[in-house]
Amino acid sequence: MKKGELVEALAQATGESQAAAAKHLDAFIEVISQQMASGDEVTITGFGSFKASKRAARTGRNPSTGAAMEIPESTAVRFTPGAKLKAAVNGQ
């Protein structure tokens, strides 16, 4: 499902226009992004939690040449699914 399809599904589920659904989805994504950028965890009970975690700098290998290269530290986004989401995906 792509963003346009998600917006259409949200509009049908809520009875709102697609423009309103798109506005709500964009706001939702923006709020989660801002909270994670500031180091906060976002938890949606039953759905899951979004969390930023640090990856340390490390040495890797260039796959085409085999030469060693330094990979700088970075921040990764982690999502941990909630119980209701797990149950829905597993057909329970």
Image: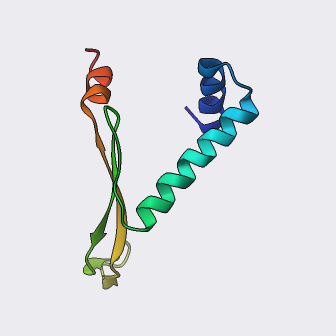
Asked if residue 63 can be seen in this view, the reply is no
Q: Is residue 65 above or below residue 18?
A: below
For the N terminus, which image quadrant? top right
Tell me the quarter of the image containing the C terminus.
top left
Coloring scheme used = rainbow
Q: Which one is in front, 42 or 80?
A: 42
- Please tell me in which quadrant of the rendered image residue 72 appears: bottom left
User: Against 56, is 5 above or below?
Assistant: above
Q: Position of residue 60 (x, y in %)?
A: 27, 77
| 64 up-or-down from 27: above or below | below
Q: Is residue 18 left or right of residue 71?
A: right
x, y percent for residue 81: 29, 38
Q: Quadrant of residue 54?
A: bottom left
Name the one closer to the observer, 16 or 85. Answer: 16
Q: Residue at x 32, y 36 (%)?
A: 45
Can I make out residue 50 in this image?
A: yes
**Which residue is depicted at the point 60% across and 40% down?**
25
Q: Residue furthest toward the top?
A: 92
Locate residue 84, reporting x and y percent: 29, 26
| Position above or below: 29 against 33 | above
Q: Quadrant of residue 62?
A: bottom left
Q: Is residue 38 left or right of residue 63?
A: right
Residue located 66% across and 24% down the image: 11
Q: Is residue 66 left or right of residue 10?
A: left
Q: How many marks?
A: 0
At horizontal 27% and vertical 35% (from top left) the residue drawn is: 82
